[in-house]
Image (spheres, rainbow, N blue to C red):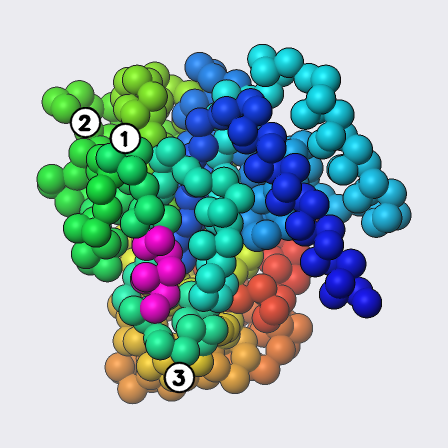
Amino acid sequence: MKKKIISFLKSILVFISRLTIRRFKPAIIVVTGSVGKTSSKEAIWAALKNRFYARKTSANFNNELGVPLSIIGNYSKVSRPVWFFWIKVLSVGFWHLIFESRNSYPRMLVLEYGADKPGDITELMSIAKPHVAVISAIGQLPVHVENYPQGIEQVAREKGKLIFELSVDDYAVLNSDDPIITKLKEKTRAKTVTFGFEKDSDVRISNFKHMIDEGRIDGIAFKMENQGASVPIILKNAFSISHAYAAACAACVGTIFEVNLIESANAFTLNYAPIKGRSVIIEGIKLTQIVDESYNSSPIALEMALKTLKMVSHTRKIAVLGDMMELGDYTVKAHETIGDLVPSCTDILITVGPRARFIAQRAIKKDMDERSVFSFDEAREAGLKLQEVIKKGDLILIKGSRVVGLDKIVEEVRAM
């Protein structure tokens, strides 16, 4: 009975969403990828909001229920009582369709599309087909691959659907540093705009570094280049290269809507801030600093975090790494590959969960001092060990899949 109710509700939401788009005709910008979707969505909205009336997907509303909610009324959560919430959503949706003027609706929608399983992108595109499609990153071993029977290639094809069905008048914004995305580029009819560290990127990132103030990381700095112009960016409280990718992605979208590089950069700096759990620098106990990446983890995201950590040389580094989920047959290989990176990136390793033990075992095989490696089954135990080993000035990276619960460790060791 419950499934029938949800199915009926979804069909009504999709119906109202399609009518809403048909009536108000917003420009639709959609972001997908294995990592960086949310940060890219936030960055695009930040770069455009000073010029256009734009709405972004709230929270993680990136599925068949969340996307219609974003289109209909910019909801950020499902409030209680649930039955009253859904009555309100449907009532407001029909009211807007009948009585609201076109000027009252956003000119642009910046939406996020998840692809947890085959068919997700197709279903979401049937609700709202983009004019600008963004693929943030896929990586050699994408997240959710466990849900794809045909493996990595099927994941790439699913995410690629976002650009395969674009027309010649549409735009595909693509990460030029990702080999899988580069292959997908050949299969779209749309105009393409690229971003990344590669020299031939339309918006190129360069000179990435951490800002150090009295021995503490204050944020990141980098440059963006486009058509001979170069703009410096300073972003407080951010740590990873992922934020630079988000900025460059947003600048690409800006060029499509005639927002120049300088205007995009200024708007990004003014309106963008790292989201909790996504490579945010926060103050820790014992005068330490924490890189909070506890929201989620995947091979490409963790690799990016570790490589950014490797850039730091002024202090001792600790990595608290949890299981990466939904990798299926690739689970052992993925964790061992991360283990290969760890010894050159951090001084102390603490792992959480049975899968993450493969990271620890591999790191030791790669000559990391066994006395600096600790493995635990639960976040609580790992948190106690972390409090025991940390010293003044340490930089602590905390990253794992949501179900591992590393956000609890962040709360335990952050300065109050």
Quote the CA–CA distance across marks 3 and 2. Answer: 41 Å
Quote the CA–CA distance across marks 2 and 1. Answer: 22 Å
The stretch drawn in magenta includes residue 237: no
Mark 1 residue type: Asp
Q: Residue at x 53, y 44 (%)?
A: 127
Count of numbered circles in the view: 3
Mark 1 nearby-residue class (10 Å; few <14, some 14–19, many ≥20): few
Using the image, determine if residue 115 lies above or below residue 364: above
The answer, for residue 138, to whether it is visible in the render is yes
Q: Which residue is mark 1?
A: 169
Is 385 or 65 nearer to us in this picture?
Answer: 65
Q: Which one is in front in this view, the residue at disc 1 or the one at disc 3?
A: 1
Mark 3 residue type: Asp
Q: Could you say which disc has been placed on residue 226 in the image?
A: 2
Please report the bounds of the magenta region as a residue range: 154-161
Q: Secondary structure at mark 2?
A: strand
Quarter-of-image position of residue 343? bottom left
Q: Quadrant of the N terminus?
A: bottom right
Judge left or right: residue 86 versus residue 224.
Answer: right
Q: Secondary structure at mark 3?
A: helix
